[in-house]
Image (spheres, rainbow, N blue to C red):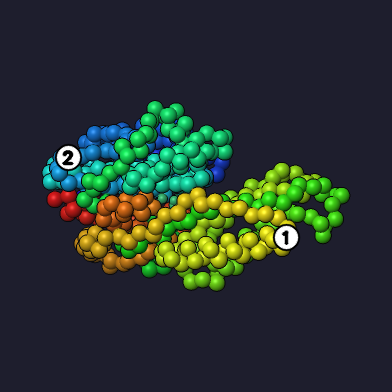
Amino acid sequence: MINGNRLLQHLHDLSQIGRNEATGGINRFSFTPEEQQAIELVTLYMKEAGMTVTVDAVGNLIGTFGEGNETIMLGSHIDTVPEGGKYDGALGVLAAIEVVQAIHEQQLSPSKKIQVVAFKDEEGTRFGFGLIGSSAMAGLLTEQQLQYTDEAGITIEEAMKEFQLSPYPLVNAQRTDIKAYLEMHIEQGKVLENEGLPVGVVTGIAAPLWLEVTVTGVSEHAGATPMPIRQDALTAASEMILAVEQMVNATTDSVATVGKLNVSPNGTNVIPGKVTFTIDLRDIDEQKISTLENAILQQLQKIAERRNVTLSSKVLQRIKPAKTDTMLQQQLAASIEKQGIQPFSLISGAGHDAMYIAEFAPIGMLFVRSKDGISHNPLEYSSDKDIVIATNIFYDTVVELAK
Ligand code: HGY
Ligand code: MN
Ligand code: MN
C-alpha cells in the first residue's frame, strides 16, 4: 500500500510553486525559475524514495530505482498550461514517486529497474509545441525544432543552455530500452464522473495537430477607409475561426480549438493588417485529422480570397494517435478489480507524453476522475479519496510488472 497522506502533501507542496495567488492558477513553464524550483523539490522526493536522480540531454528529470536488465518507466510532467491546475501532470509524477517509495520502504526487490520521469515541456506553453522531452526520448525531436522561439525570441536551444543542458547530439536523449511505460493522469473530461467511477483504463490517446494560421490584409485608418475597400485581417480571421468551428461541429468525435489569437498592430483606430491564430485539431483517427486539416485549409483559403487578404499556415506539431498495450490494459483492470471497482475503458481526448513513448515501448495509462471534467483551469480537482485509490491501483500494477 502507498502512503496517501505523504502523496497528498507532496501534491500540495508542488502546487505552491508557480501559483498565482490572485487566481489560484499555476504557471510553471519550461526553463524558468519556477520550473527549476519544482525540479529541485521533485528531485528531493525522488531521493527520499530511494532513487538516484539524473537529467538527460534535453532536461528530462529521471529517478532510477533498483537494478535489472529490463526497465519499467513511469512518468508524466510538472510543467503547466497558463493558469493551470494542480493535478495535470504533477499527479502522475508524484504518484509514481510514491509507488517507488512504498516499494522501497516495504523492501520489495523488483527484478526490473524502475524509472520515474518528469518529462520536459509536455504542455508546449512557451515555445509553440509540446512534448519536447518525450519526443526527444522517441528520437523524434529535431535540431530545427530547437530553433523555435518563445515570445521574447529565445530559442529552445538557448533556454536549454541557460539551464546548463547541452542537447546535442539529440540522439543522447533517445531511449530504446523500456520494457513498459505507465502513466497515471487525471481524465480531464466527464466520462468517469458520469459513470460514477474513480478510475478508468485508457485504450487510446487522441493526438493534437497544432497549426498556426497567419492572415495578412492591410493596416489602414479606421475612420478614413470605407468598408467596401478594406482588407481587414481580423474580420477575415473571425469568419475563418467560425468556419473551423462549424466544420468540426459537423463531424463525429473530432474537436478543434482556437486558443491563441494575435492582432497587429492592435490599435483601436487601426484596421488590423495581420492576425495569427492557432488551431488545435484532434481525433483518435489519424486519417480523419488529415482529411479535416485539408478541408479546413481549403475553406480558409476561399474566405481569404473573397476578403482580399492572404493566408499562410504552419504545422507547429503533428503527433500520431496512440493505442495502449492490451496486456497493460488487462493488468490495470486486474488491479482495479482487486479494489472491488468495476474496470472501465475509455479514450483520452487529451494528449500525453505516453503518445511518444508508444513509438518505442508498450504503454498503459490509468485515469483518475476529474470533478465536472474541468482541467487546464485553476478549478481542476480530483478528490483525495480517488487519488489514494488510484495510486494504490497504480502501485499494484507496477509491483506486478516489475516482478
Ligand atoms: O494538450 C494536451 O492535450 C495536453 O494537456 N498537453
Ligand atoms: Mn495538460
Ligand atoms: Mn497532462
For this view, does 15 lie left or right of residue 235? left
- The front one of 198 and 272 is 272
Circle 2: element type: loop
Q: Residue at x 55, y 56 (%)?
A: 279
Q: Given the image, on which type of amino acid does mark 2 rest?
A: Gly
Location of residue 243 in the rendering, given as x and y in whole percent from the top left corner: 62, 65
Q: Nearer the viewer, mark 2 or mark 1?
A: 1
- The front one of 231 and 282 is 231
- Cβ atoms under marks 2 and 1 closer than 8 Å: no
Location of residue 240 in the rendering, given as x and y in whole percent from the top left corner: 64, 61
Q: Is residue 226 above or below residue 53?
A: below
Location of residue 224 in the rendering, given as x and y in whole percent from the top left corner: 87, 49
For this view, does 296 lie left or right of residue 158? right
Q: Residue at x 32, y 34 (%)?
A: 55
State the separation of the CA atoms marked 2 and 1: 63 Å
Q: Residue at x 49, y 66 (%)?
A: 291
Q: Residues within 10 Å of mark 2 (few under 14, many from 20)?
A: some
Q: Which residue is mark 1?
A: 307
The numbered disc on residue 179 is none
Q: Is residue 103 visible?
A: no
| Ligand 3 lies under 8 Å from the Cβ of mark 2 | no
For this view, does 196 lie left or right of residue 230? left
The numbered disc on residue 66 is 2
Q: Residues within 10 Å of mark 1 (few under 14, many from 20)?
A: many
> Which quadrant holds residue 287?
bottom left
Q: Given the image, on which type of amino acid does mark 1 rest?
A: Arg
